[in-house]
Image: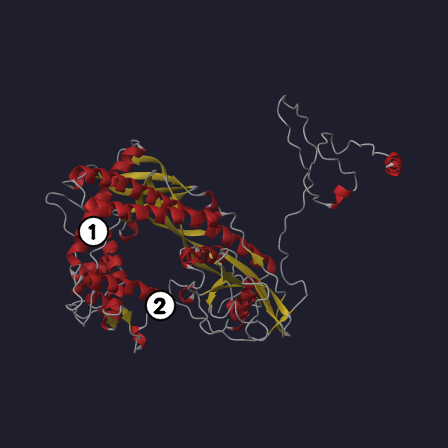
Amino acid sequence: MIGLGSTAPRQFAFTTRAHAAVDDATGEPIGLDDVDTRVGWLLDLIAAAGGELVSRLWQPVTFEVLAAGRDGAGRRLPAQGHVAAARLGWNPHYPTGVYVPSRVTRVVTAQVMTSLRTLAYRDTAMTALSERFDPATGRIAPPTRAADWVPAGFARGLQRQLVAHSRRTDTDAVPAGRVRITDIQGPPRTSAMARLSAADRQLAQITAAGRELVLTVKLPTCPAPAGRAQWRRVRLTAAIPGHLQGRAVTDWHLPTLVLDRKGLLWRCAAAELVPVGDLGSATVAVGVDWSPSTLGAAATAASGPDGLSSDYRGVTYDDRGLGTKLARLQAEGQMLHRKAARLTRLAATAPPEVRAQLEAKIAVLNEHRTAVGVKRGKINRELGFHFARQVTDYAEAAGATVIAVEDLTTLETRGHGRVNNNRAAQSARRKATAALAHTAAGVGIAVVSVPARGSSAQCPGCDEPLARPGGYHTAWCSGCRVGGNRDHVAGVNLAKRALLGKRKVTRRRGQLPAIRVAEHAPVRRSRDKNGPTPSRPRHRRVRRSLPTVTPRLGVTPNRHVPAPRASVWDTVKHEPPQGDAGSRGTRTSPTPATPVADSMRST
């Protein structure tokens, strides 16, 4: 039972960098460049050992064992990757004469088991789809059992792999049986990183002192350490980010060490206490609709003694031009990919001297494409958290305790053209959902996923199809006399589904609480003030005075046209004529009307 004011722990991630390093035994300072070099040696050992282990285990029997979840004695495999690998006897091999501590081996096996367990699900789905795949038509028959169902987007990706596999092989020689993941693709590359969370205090430990984090980790002193003496402890000190200072953090977890262009980067995790939102007592909900034109829009719905009501006035997120920038970077990355692929085909049949030049160009293109991907990742993160903050503030102002978002697993963009479909599919929706859940949990607002089907096409009042009198972005119901922006109406539908299904929430570990069934109840239009007023920019007075400029000889000066009126205050004083260089406070004497009238009579 959740009581009022109760709290619960939740984990979150952040990044930081070390600003000081000392030898833990002698206390002598160590340069950060030397630390980066020693961490690079550690990552090289981990990546080489992980790659060798994955290549050795890239066999169908490996995925059969992982899919069964049992060891040779029939016991259930533990959740910890390094413990499961030790029980199965899957240990990495190191070069002769190189000594590596057993805790580093734990890190290697934990990372390898994470990748193999993810690919085991893909192997199972591919095996089921290959049995229903027709190489002649390239189509997959519908599933006959519920256990063979996979998400539509996931199935399309596997179908493309099966089509490419059938084209590479002889069509007549393709067996009608099962195809495994080891038949279609090679072993994946292992990332150069060290997940210290798989180890214990013998390899690394972390403590918080004031506004700093102190990480003590054992690093090699040479590329190929031959004994324990060539592994020494280094004490690294990093600052806690400013947005985490003052928060109720209960535990700091060991980070993941990676190297980027700036040096050593800590990818840390921590646990804190946050207020718990009670879904069962929610009376006001905010629905978030993902839009193809912008990232999303939000609207509110409230339940009371008279049923559900809404003012049908929502807010649309303004991405400040970041969406346009993302589309440009995506097009640039695709262009670089096409160019590199074309040069690769040319290099395959080119003479040796030309091939060397083409390979150099290909390397430059791949480097540029990687940089574009890094930029897109940073913009997506900024976009997601900015969107999450705006929606959370909107929900707080409305007094909502639950935010409903569309279920991304059932949301597929279609009917907007190939380019727009691709842009919408690669948008930051999933990152925005994670950022929204993180930001809203900090103020005690729960985020749930609701079904997306029909949210933009059905009326919240009568559940009938909506008309589109003004085009795609408008919606109107002639029976209920409600309508407006299409995304705002969809937000009302999503908020309604959250309020009606608040007693039927399904919770799964690692996922948002979900409402699987979309129930209907009429939502009446309310004119009461039960929602926040959308912020609008105020009109600013426009200064129409122009600085006095001495015209240059021989150049025809441009005539300055004043800006349009910005507020009612502009009508108080006489509007200066075009080309007037005086200030607004200067009163110009108007031309008398009598001489003009006399001149008109005389004509």
Q: Position of residue 64 (x, y in %)?
A: 19, 67
Q: Crowding at label 2, few (<14), some or many (≥20) Cα neighbours within 10 Å? A: few
Q: Nearer the viewer, mark 2 or mark 1?
A: 2
Q: Is residue 447 visible?
A: yes
Mark 1: few/some/many CA within 10 Å (<14, 14-19, 20+) = many
Amino acid type of the residue tagged 1 in the rendering: Gly
Q: Is residue 401 visible?
A: no
* Left or right: 593 in relation to 553: right
Q: Which mark is residue 152?
A: 2
Query: Seen from this angle, which residue lies furthest top?
Result: 553
> What's the distance in space between the residues labelled 2 and 1, CA to CA?
32 Å
Residue 176 rendering spot, x and y as whole percentages: 18, 72
Q: Name the residue tied to disc 1.
A: 50
Q: Above or below — where is 251 with respect to 302?
A: above
Q: How is the image coloured?
A: secondary structure
- Residue type pointed to by label 2: Ala
